[in-house]
Amino acid sequence: MPSASTLTERLRRLAPEAIAFGVIGAGNTLLYMAITWAALPIGAVKASVIATLVTTTLAYFANRYWTYRHHTRTALRREYTLFFGFNLVGMVIQSGAVATAKYGFGLTEEHDELLFMGVTLLGIVCATIFRFWAYRTFVFLKPPVDGHEAELAELDPVAGFAELSAEAEAEPAGSASLRGRSPSNR
């Protein structure tokens, strides 16, 4: 069991990341509502799709260059695809909470407005916690700390390629042939 000082230190390091994540999320929620409102004349579904694409893309770049700026960078395609995919899972969590309330517990929009708002809020909280965990675990890789990042990158070919490309650019000429050999063979 971790000590209180270890837990306090961990929370202290996590707090700035969580705050930046929350600020971006709040701003993007407001922007989503504004885009949807402005685009309603072309249809509610089209407006929602446009707002989702715009705010998800902005959220990706804001999180990449602010919240997770100190994390290892991998290929844009890899990060954005995972980011968008985890956003979709978050949307399913949020919508699933509302659907469960409506179809599982029989709540109606006419009589249970406050309960719906509470369930919606619960869905948003659960989805936000999931997204925060998924982004920092799978999308924006933790910064290198112990020199074993190559072993982790081998699990993901795109991340591995990005890491090897970065190493190749940073190595002096002639040292690339030594990569992959144990110290006793050099």
Image (tube, helix red, strand yellow):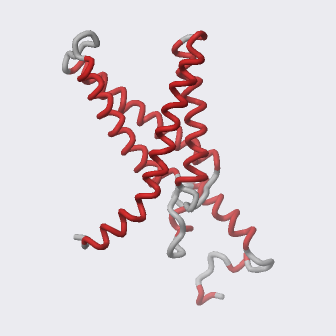
Question: On the picture, is 122 further left or further right than 75?
Answer: left
The image position of residue 160, as x and y in percent, is: 60, 60
The image position of residue 183, as x and y in percent, is: 59, 87
The image position of residue 76, as x and y in percent, is: 64, 48
Q: Residue at x 46, y 58 (%)?
A: 16
Picture layout, residue 7 above or below residue 172: above
Could you say which quadrant of the image residue 130 lies in?
top left
Picture layout, residue 107 above or below residue 8: above
Could you say which quadrant of the image residue 111 lies in?
top left
Q: Residue at x 45, y 45 (%)?
A: 22
Is 67 in front, or is 165?
A: 67
Is 56 in front, or is 28?
A: 28
Is 13 in front, or is 132?
A: 13
Look at the image and tell me in which quarter the N terminus lies. bottom left
Q: Residue at x 66, y 76 (%)?
A: 179
The image position of residue 178, as x and y in percent, is: 69, 80
